[in-house]
Image (cartoon, coloured by chain):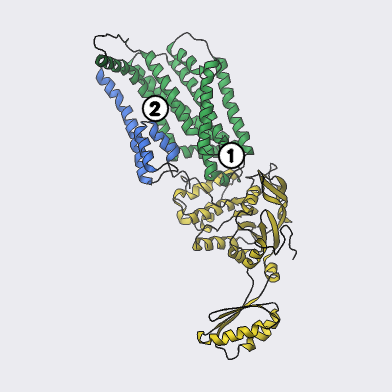
Amino acid sequence: MSAIIIEGLAKRFGTLAALAGFDLTVPRGAIFGFLGPNGAGKTTTLRIMAGLAHATAGRVVIEGVEVGRGQRPPIGYLPDTPSFYGWMTAREFLRYIADLHGLERPPIDAMLERVGLADAARKRIGGFSRGMKQRLGLAQALLPQPRVLLLDEPVSALDPAGRKAMLDIMSELRGELTVFFSTHILGDAERICDEVGILDRGRLVLQARRDDLLARYARPIFEIDAAPSDTPRLSALAGQLRALPWVDRVNLEGARLRLTVNDVDAARREVLPMLAGLSVSRFEMLGATLEDIFLGLTNSAGVPTGTEVAL
Amino acid sequence: MDDSTLILALIPLFLIQVGLQIYALVDIYRRKTVREPLPIWAWVIIVLAGSMLGPIAYFALGRSEDVA
Amino acid sequence: MRIFGVQLRKELRELWRTRKLIVVLAVLVGFGLMSPILAKITPDLLEQFSEGQMEGIVITIPEPTERDAIDQFLKNISQFGLLLALLMSFGVIVGERERGQLALVFPHPLPREVFVLAKFAALAILFVVGMLLSALGAYLYTVLLFDAPSLGGFLALTWLMIVWLLCLVALSLLASALGRSMVAAGGIAFVLIIAVLLASLFTPLAPGQLLDWGRALAVGADAPARWDALIVTLGLSALAVSANCLILRRQEIG
């Protein structure tokens, strides 16, 4: 069974179509990255899923419960910039949330420990940093043990340390529940997602397992670093390579040669021998990144919008 | 009933009014920040000039820590 | 009901922690104490003023009585109590929405009507307690400075003022749900309250009539009972709170 089923979801604000009517299914237990540039409609989708906004058309079913039909689906939700009651302490806020859910013995201290706020449990939230609030936001979403966790840009506004801490906590949730999070930062999605969907101008342009996606769109790139004194010989090599049929593009920047190929096997066989006599300090094959795919899909005419790419 | 009773009767009132104003000013001083969009000095003037309503306005609308 | 209890506790704790409770109580008590004093010293002030200004003209100002103290109390509460009801209520819902606190708590099992009811209940408790303390202060000082007015009449006046104030609170709270921003909510609340005040000029059923009725009961004057106005006021308050629940339920948050 699927954790999240979105069917024909559309949302208009006056004449502006924020969501153009898209379908999306998220398997149970996945860490799902909901990608898209700013303004693509990610936050609107999440707000509808959390019951804060109403869809113009279409529906969202989470763990078998349709959103906005009276019953509350088992979700935990973290808005992009959570704001709290500054006069409460972290522990008081979690106690309040637990009381709303009628939890008998809520694991408040364990939860604060888990998100790294054990030391700040008795401090007023009014004095919390951005990253602390983000982690407390995660704690309040997780406390009632939801089946589906909805996170809106959970790491975008954090500094590198805060981002790493947040991502680590999120990947520890793997297997425990379904995590659905939006981001415009691809590196984060690439690190922890099992599956990704890409939204652009209110349409889902792609949904796939991350590994399939990387394999399918892989356009391997080879990088060769030589000693600076060998630059002339490297540029001669670049000329040689340009003539070969399996080479798409050759880039030479100082003592670094970047090679884009269309036949990985041929490249693997033939590049290395050509390096004989060159003082090579590094020879590496780079995979495609989500960023390459993302830019290709959302910017250009490469993929027609509105069609799902089957993988 | 003479004037001294009246003056005695005025003392609690005076204490409430001045107490509230001092309370509000100390609160502003301790946080060193107020809620948007008015600046701190505007709230100081409101508290001082608004007799008892100044502190009320500050605690209802100007105090910053209610948000986080 | 359980959730209402949780939410009411949160609202009351918020009033306490953000110092609003103590400040409102102090101000209401202050106005209670101030009223009889003002009634007492007003003639003296007038006398001094007129002596300086108009020499030779003798103005006889009658000795003030407990009636003047009651009138002062009524006047102060109807002006500053009104302001207080407005200030304490119009920002509470729109504020939580604007700051994003609602987007955090509404996905939890907190029905929006329960949220509204708890807000109103907390403000009602604040104003009932505040007004009772204020009335106690006013009564004690009136007894100290004048003769004792009828306790029953004074209590009736106090409760009628409370009903009137809570109607204004309900209307300001409605404005707080309607307004898109803090300023807009303040404007709507102001307009609603002005409309209710003006209604007193046109109909004996308006909430403002409760104050005249209360005054008559407190000073022992002859005036018709205004049960109809009382029912209208309670009905208007209930209507405002119900409308508030419906509006917030349909509203998009965030």
Chain displayed in green: C
Chain displayed in yellow: A
Instruction: Spot the residue most to the right.
Output: A310
* Residue B18 image-quadrant placement: top left
The residue pinned by badge 1 equals C3
* Residue type, label 2: Val
- The image shows residue A257 at horizontal and vertical percentages of 58, 80
Q: Disc 2 on helix, strand or loop?
A: helix
Dot 2 or dot 1, earlier in sequence:
1
Residue A107, visible in the rendered structure: no
- The image shows residue A204 at horizontal and vertical percentages of 70, 57
Seen in the picture, residue C68 relative to C99 is either above or below; the reply is above
* Residue C35 image-quadrant placement: top left
Chain B drawn colour: blue
Is A87 displayed left or right of C63 in the figure? right
Residue A223, visible in the rendered structure: yes
The residue pinned by badge 2 equals C29
- The image shows residue C122 at horizontal and vertical percentages of 51, 33
**Residue count near mark 2 (Cα–Cα under 10 Å), binned few <14, some 14–19, many ≥20:** many
* Residue C141 image-quadrant placement: top left
Quarter occupied by the C terminus of chain A: bottom right
Q: Disc 1 on helix, strand or loop?
A: helix
